Image (spheres, helix red, strand yellow):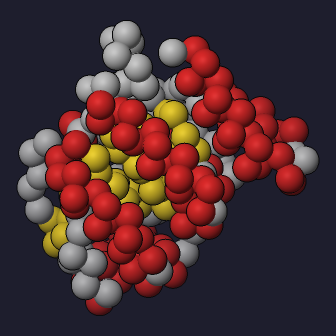
Amino acid sequence: MRSSRYLIIVCVLATFCSCGNRRLRSDLTGFIGSEVVVPEDMRPTVNGRDTVLTDFMSGRAKMVVWYDSARCASCAISKMYLWADILTYAAQIERKFGVVFLFTPKPDDLHAVRIALMSYKIDYPVFLADQTEFVKLNACLPQDDRMHTFLLDADNKVLLVGNPLRNDKLWKLYEATIRKLLINNGRLSASEG
């Protein structure tokens, strides 16, 4: 169990070490293993329209892709097609693994985000939440947007950090970790929990 976690932390650190940034490494090691709390007011939308989802967050593994208010939301939405292969992978596993797209826009930008979601016909659940509430519930969240994509286990603990679209080796690590989570009921090893 400990060796699996150690290996994951080492691999993720190796991904970020090229920048040589101590703050980045510190944020990363502080983030791995933290619990991410999902806000009560998180609103699911499909194509920019409110919808109801019952157990979307209850999977054994969840990849969260968080777009905070500092990012251009419409720019991010226009590039969501890049996630198609990973969404296909998630669909094959059905309710055991899901990708959670989370936008936390400023209140003044919420309408523009909804319009962009409708315009680009995002036919996959996208969650909208209050930026202040999400950050308050999750003080562990790094500000660096390179760490705004992360893999959670069944207990919403952060296992991996980084955008797998940008790195094939990182995606392979995500896949291997997801397989372990599926085999072990949402935990890295059967002895956990």
> Residue drawn at (49%, 61%), measured in percent from left and top?
67
Question: Left or right: 163 with respect to 134?
Answer: right
> Residue drawn at (56%, 24%), measured in percent from left and top?
4
- Looking at the picture, how far across and down is residue 149, in whole percent? 52, 53
Q: Is residue 130 above or below residue 50?
A: above
- Indicate the quadrant where residue 22 lies: top right
- Indicate the quadrant where residue 43 lies: bottom left
Q: Is residue 26 visible?
A: yes
Q: Is residue 136 visible?
A: no
> Residue drawn at (51%, 34%), measured in percent from left and top?
159
> Residue drawn at (37%, 24%), measured in percent from left and top?
187
Question: Left or right: 74 with respect to 190?
Answer: right
> Which of the image's four quarters has the C terminus?
top left
- Looking at the picture, how far across and down is residue 191, in whole percent? 37, 10
Q: Is residue 3 above or below residue 50?
A: above
State how many labels appear: 0
- Looking at the picture, how far across and down is residue 11, in whole percent? 68, 40
**Between 19 and 102, which is closer to the camera in this rendering?**
19
- Farthest residue to the bottom: give it: 119
- Looking at the picture, how far across and down is residue 6, in whole percent? 65, 23
**Between 42 and 62, which is closer to the camera in this rendering?**
62
